[in-house]
Image (cartoon, grey):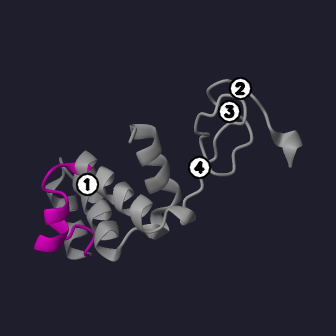
Amino acid sequence: MDRETINYVIRYFSELLTEDEALALNHHMYTLKSAENTSLRNKMAELGWINSDPEITRLLELGYEVFEQNVVTRIMVEVPQKVFFNNCPKCNKLARTPYAKQCRHCGYSWHHLT
């Protein structure tokens, strides 16, 4: 699965993540944001934004990109009917959002089709 599709599913269908996957996603994000600030990292850990649960960190042990790939693969196997891929009617490439009506790749607009 390509990077664009993975990002699209994670960004626009995050409600399909399991609780542990959502916690791992937040753990990764807040760990990156606080990488160079120890006091900020400690505060985020205190607030529970950075999780030290071994089950959560295990999801990320092969790297963030592998984690994302695994999440999207699971979603597409378990509930593919809940994911809407908004592809351009002209070039068939993935639009930026599920509600976009203009292609960022070829510029085609399909506002008139609704």
Marks 1,3: beta carbons within 8 A: no
User: What residue range appears in magenta?
Assistant: 48-64
> Which callout, 2 or 4, points to the residue nearer the camera?
4
Q: Which residue is mark 3?
A: 103
Q: Where is residue 47, by image quadrant?
A: bottom left
Q: Hey, what amino acid is under mark 3?
A: Cys
Q: Earlier in the sequence, mark 4 or mark 1?
A: 1
How far is disc 2 from disc 4 in space, using C-alphas?
18 Å
Q: Hey, what amino acid is under mark 2?
A: Gly
Marks 4,1: beta carbons within 8 A: no
Q: Earlier in the sequence, mark 2 or mark 1?
A: 1
Q: Which residue is mark 2?
A: 107
Q: Nearer the viewer, residue 94 or 30?
A: 94
Q: Report helix, strand or loop for mark 3.
A: loop
Q: Report helix, strand or loop for mark 4.
A: loop
* Residue 76, x across and y down, in percent: 43, 59
Q: Which residue is mark 1?
A: 67
Task: Please tell me how crowded label 4 is: few (under 14), some (14-19), or many (20+) other residues with Cα within 10 Å.
Answer: some
